[in-house]
Structures are given as C-alpha cells and as structure tokens.
Amino acid sequence: MEQGRLVPQYQLVAKQLLRISKSLNEIFQDQLNIAFDLNAQNMFRIDQERHAVHVANGLFQLKFYAPESPLKSILQCDFTYSGQKAEAFEEFILHDLYFLTGDLKPQHSLFLRQKAQQLRQLLLEQIYVWVNGAERISTYLKYLRVDEAEIIDQLMMNAGIYHSKVLTDYVLNKTALPAAIVQMLQQICSIQVVCGDEFLALQPLMECLDEFCFSASQFLPAAMYRIMALSFEERFNLNELIEHQDDIQLLYRHAQEKAQLLGFVRLMRRELWQRDDLLSKHNFLHASSTVWQKKVAKLPLFDYPRTVNWLFKQSGDVLDWLSRHIQHSSVRVAVTALSFLDTSQVHPQVILATLQYFQHSSARMFIHSCHYFAMQEEWFKHENNQSVVLKGQRQALDDHRIAISPSILYLDEWMELMRSVAKGNEQTVKKIYLRLSRVMQAYMLHLQKITQALPEDLMFYLRPDTHQNRDFYPVLQRYKMQLDAFRQIFYLRGRHTRVSVFDSYVRDYLVDYFSDNKTILKSMTWMGLFHQAIHWHDQIQKQEIIAQLKKNYAEAVWQPLMVEKKTQFAGWSFEELADLDRIIEESKRCHHCLAVSYAQRIMEGEYVAFHMASKTGTHHMTLGCHLREGQLLYDQLEYPHNQKAEYLFVNIALQFISWLNLQLIAFK
C-alpha cells in the first residue's frame, strides 16, 4: 500500500492505541505537556524593548546585544530543554531562515509552505526526542503482553497496514520484528502522527513565518539592523549576523551617530572604519581624502560646500540610493543641481524620485549648458584651463591636452573644465546649473503637488517598481483606495496623450530642448513642459514618417488630374499637389498631416490634394478630395494647423470641384 494512503490509517490506529494502552498514552501526554499551548501566534514572540525573540512559546530564546555589551557575542541563543539541545532546530533558525531587507516582494507561497512544514517537523521531532518517545516504545514492545499484541495486530490488519499477526508471533515465538514495523511503531505515538495537520496548521504557520522574515528591524537594535541592511541589501540569516560581528563592532558608533550617511561606508576602506571623522564633510569635499576605495572613481565626490551641506540634510532613503550610485558622475551632477534648490519642505520620497528620474539625462543637459557658456566666455582660452581643448581645433604636436566635444563621453572632462574656470565661485556654478536646476524643480514640485493629499504610508510607493512590495496592497486597502485610482494620480494628460510622470516622454524632449540653449523660466511648470513635449514628439513622429515616405516612394510617379500646374478659378489659385516633394512641403508649411495620412492614397489614385490661395495671398488653405470613378468628392478644406475653413470658402471649393469634374468628363 502506498505511503501517502497509509498516513491517515496510521492516525486512526494511533488514536485507538492511546485509548487501550496507558504507556503509549503517557508518551503522547508528555509531548502535549511541552507543546500544549504552542500555536502560530506564539511561535515567534518579539520583545522589542529587550531585543529578544521567544521561539515556540518560549521553548527557545534569542537575545541580541549591542557591541558595547560586556558579552563577547552579539547573539545569545538558548536551544536547550531539560538539559538537551535542539541542534537541528537551532540549525534551521540560524541558517535556513532569512530576514528580508531590500527585497520586499512577497515570498512565494510554495517556498513558505516548504519552510513551514520543515519548521513544524523539526519542532515536533525534537519534542518526541525530549520525551524519549522511540526508546519508550522499544521498551514497551520488549515487555508487550500477548493480549495487547493481539489487539494491536487486529487494529493494524483492519487498517491494512500489514496482513499477519506480526506482534503476536513476536511475543509468543520471539521472532524478530521487521525493521519497517519497528520504525513505524516507534513513531506512531508522536504528535505528528496522532494529530496530523490539526496541530500547528500550516496556513497560520506560513503567515507567522512570513511576518517573522520581515521583522528583523523589530528585534535587532536599530544601529545593528541599519548595518545589516546595508551590508546585506537583499537578505541575511542569523549565522551571517554572527559572522559579521567584527564589522558591526567597527561601524556601530557611526550607525548611532550618523545613521543616514552610513551607506557611504560601503565605499570606504575598511581599515579606516574606526576613525572618528570617517563620515565628516571633509571627506566628501576634498580630493586629498584617503578614506575612499578606488571604485569611487573621481575625487572629490563633490566640488562645492553647498552640495555637501545639502547632502548631509537628506534622509536615509535618499542617501542610501545615492551611496549606491555616487560613483557615476551623472548622479553627482543631478545632486549638485538639486542642491541649488530649497528642498527642506519636500518629501524625501519626492526628492528620491526626482534624482532617479534625472540620474542619466542630467549629464547631457549639463554638458549642453557647459558648452554654451564655454563658447560664450571662451573657457578653452582661460588661463586656468590646462587640460582640455575643443575637438576640431588645431593642436601643436607638443600640446597634450585632451580634445573634447559636447558628448556624454567627456562628462568628467567638462566637469573638470568648469571646476578650473569657476575656481569655487558658486555663483558661476549656479549660473551653469540654472536650467537643469529649474527643470528638476518643475518635476519635483509637480510630484509634491500631486501627492500632497496622500497618507504618509503611501508615499513609500510612489515609484512603480515599489508596487510589487508585499505591503503595498494592504496599505491601499487600509486607506480604501483602488489601485487604478492610485496610479491615475501619476499620469500626465493632454491632447489625446497620456503618459506616466515617471516615463521618459518629457525627459527625452528636454535633452533636445537643452541642445538649443533655450531659456528655462523660473515659473516653468512640468505640465507646461509636458505640453511642449507633446508638440515635439508629434513633430518627430511626422519627420520619421515623412523620411520613410521619401525612402519608400522616392521614385513614385503618378498622373496628375490637371494639365496645368496652377488653375485660376473665381479669384482663387488652385495648385494640384502632384509629386511627393510638393506634398511634404505643403505638410511642413501648413503644419498638418497631409503627407503622413494621405500621401500613399494620393499615389494610389484614391485621393487628390490642392493648395488653394486667394489672389491677394492673404488666405492659404489645403483642399482634400476623394477620387472615385474619375470624379472628385469634397472631403475637407483647412487652414494651417488643421483649422477648418469658413463656409464661404468651402462653397468656392465646391464650385471648383464641380467645374473640374466637368472638365474631367470632357477629357474622357
């Protein structure tokens, strides 16, 4: 019989055995005395004040100590009961349970089920060991009476577990019991067999286990958790915590005094962690600082005290992200631009979202501004510039300066050139950063405005990538907000266009906008830039379509309807647009979609377009007509920018069409 089908039978037999045998019932009761009150709710009980965790209703203890404690270890574990140590269970708690730090997505239910089953099995097996269950069963079998053997045999055979009087034969004839039967009988009185899934039900156990995996910030001292969350960005187990004790010892004071800046320690030389001035402003501002690892790249991190002062006022969330990306010069540019703004009243999550939005594009915008001022103020001829020259200029053979162009490839060189010319003058630097600062301000203020009514708990979920976090939907439900309603807050809308505020739609336009050195007014809003971006994207799309038309139909020719290039009618001039270049020219000059939407139909003989102009030249319009069976049918008459023409002029166009149709009939 299959093992899976035998388990329920074991449970039924086990319950009957407990009723007929006092010895077996005592084994079961001894287990219950240990585990009677055990449930999912008290499996992990956290004492935040004492930094302790009581496991399995207090059977085991975990106690965490700050490094300044006289104890040698930061974690004291007690996995003993009545002098016996639960080694397998300790191994599970210290090595197999992971505490999530940066990976806040829900844990997979199959993974949680497997861990919950493992936890329950290890615990119940340990309790069975504590009561010497297997040994007591062996002793019971050794002194088994015939009448009891016959009853147990009958129960086993009725349940289909075996088919002969194994125990009776064992008692009467002293025959050896099969190993499988002995093993089965040794476990039959355990809680696992007697109670099955009723004891420590899996679903509640999975839920409490899941909560515990996200609870490290509750039971660890705050400074210790801060260090672990930075050292293990996704997850850690308690064994890794123990192994990390030396690092915790070195960083603990910094984590207490300057917790928000601690992320930068990951970029610093470990042998210098004990220094009192490790996180001082000096190390962020001077190239002579020796605390940084080589992977930081360019030093100093920042050139101006204003930027460092701004940095030191930011939240841990902002600074953690910056410390992970600060080796990229483009991020330093974005930080410098933002430091010229007053962000004291802006939510940290809005500041973070702004930095993330501009982290790459800020470099290109900065370079465009630098190039403009370099040309205006002759930076390349400046006495302090000894390192670069504009690409394309003549260089002597002994001139070893680097030739640069306004390209992202030369970002560090442009930053160095500006540093040389400005010589620490923040007003000069502010002038160069002004346009970038203003567009970042427009974005930041827009985000602040659209989120100002949101509860504080929801501010952590502004960016779409956070919507996968396990707590996002519960927080939405707490405030009775639908997911779609929340996401609608972050859409920009205008002229049949809807894009997310986190989309690159406006940012792409800004890079092009900066290349023309256009002024950014202080009053500029993100919605204003969005509407400009709509027009820019429309133009780009039209240009792409026109280019494709030229490529596909460069050699296309078709027979025009009119013999003459232009025809005069009722004081108006009508010119048939009879070749591709003329169609494209009309579209560009009148800012409409003739080339994009109608060129192919014109070439295929389904549509005809005319340029219609008054004798005085004061009115210019585009007339469009369907061509069916050799006759024109009026479709539309529009001024530039798709503005509809007045009825008076439409009537003239209709008269022209009627006249031309008669001409077409006559030519047949």
Image: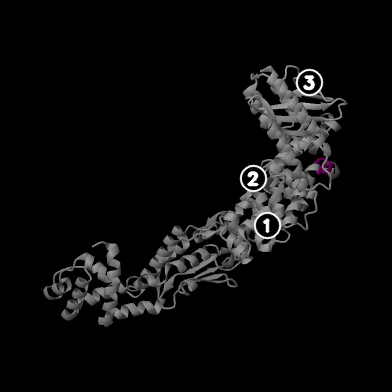
Say which of 442 and 403 sits in front: 442
**Which residue is the site of mark 2?**
293
The kind of residue tagged 2 is Gln
- The prevailing secondary structure element of the residues shown in magenta is helix
Is residue 313 within the magenta segment?
Answer: no
Q: Earlier in the sequence, mark 1 or mark 3?
A: 1
Q: Earlier in the sequence, mark 1 or mark 2?
A: 2
**Which residue is the site of mark 3?**
567
The span picked out in magenta is 429-434
Instruction: List x then y, in percent, for residue 88.
Output: 40, 64
The kind of residue tagged 1 is Gly
Q: Determine which quarter of the picture holds residue 482.
A: bottom right
Mark 2 burial class by Cα count in 10 Å: few <14, some 14-19, many 20+? few
Instruction: List x then y, in percent, for residue 398.
Output: 75, 21
**Which residue is the site of mark 1?**
316
| Residue 589 visible here | no
